[in-house]
Amino acid sequence: MLSLWDLLTILSGSSAVAGAYVAARRENIAPFYFAAAILAGLTLGALCVWAIRKSGRLVARRWASELQPRTAATRKAKLILASLYVGAVAWLVVSDVIAYQFTKNLIQLLRMGGVNAG
């Protein structure tokens, strides 16, 4: 079964790939550059997945006592989890923008370097 946290993790990785894809499509580039852009997006997506998972583990470790089943209904536990989910959703937007800008700059750098794209 897929939890909300797993869904946000998957979306975080795929939004980075989508940002790289959009940057590559807007630049109207050769296949070599397009492949490099998608590879950059996949790498950034993997880093985003790692960051989301790491932050989830840190929150779980830091507030483990407040997130136990017997105390999970408390106001503090709900606030902690809501903050974590809001942060993850915000990270979706941030990862997309980071991947877009990184890929756009990578393509410009490859063009300036004179890499033969064929």
Image: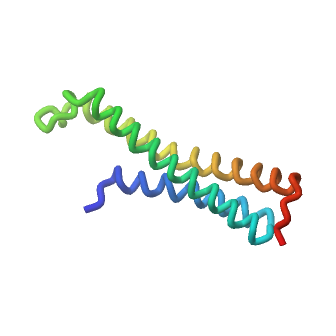
Q: Quadrant of residue 7?
A: bottom left
Q: Which scheme is used to colour this image of the protein?
A: rainbow
Q: Quadrant of residue 68?
A: top left
Q: Is residue 33 above or below residue 66?
A: below
* Residue 68 horizontal side relative to residue 36, left or right: left
Residue 111 in picture, x, y percent from top left:
85, 57
Residue 34 in picture, x, y percent from top left:
72, 66
Residue 55 in picture, x, y percent from top left:
40, 37
What residue sits 36% from the left and 39% below the top?
A: 56
Which quarter of the rendering shows the N terminus?
A: bottom left
* Residue 118 horizontal side relative to residue 20, left or right: right
What residue sits 15% from the left and 32% below the top?
A: 71
* Residue 15 horizontal side relative to residue 72, left or right: right
Q: Is residue 89 above or below residue 73?
A: below
Which quarter of the rendering shows the C terminus?
A: bottom right
Residue extending farthest left: 70
* Residue 86 horizontal side relative to residue 5, left or right: right
What residue sits 77% from the left and 49% below the top?
A: 105
What residue sits 30% from the left and 27% below the top?
A: 62
Residue 18 in picture, x, y percent from top left:
60, 61
What count of labels does the image hold? 0
**Closest to the observer: 54 or 1?**
54
**Closest to the observer: 85 or 11?**
11
Q: Is residue 12 above or below residue 25?
A: above
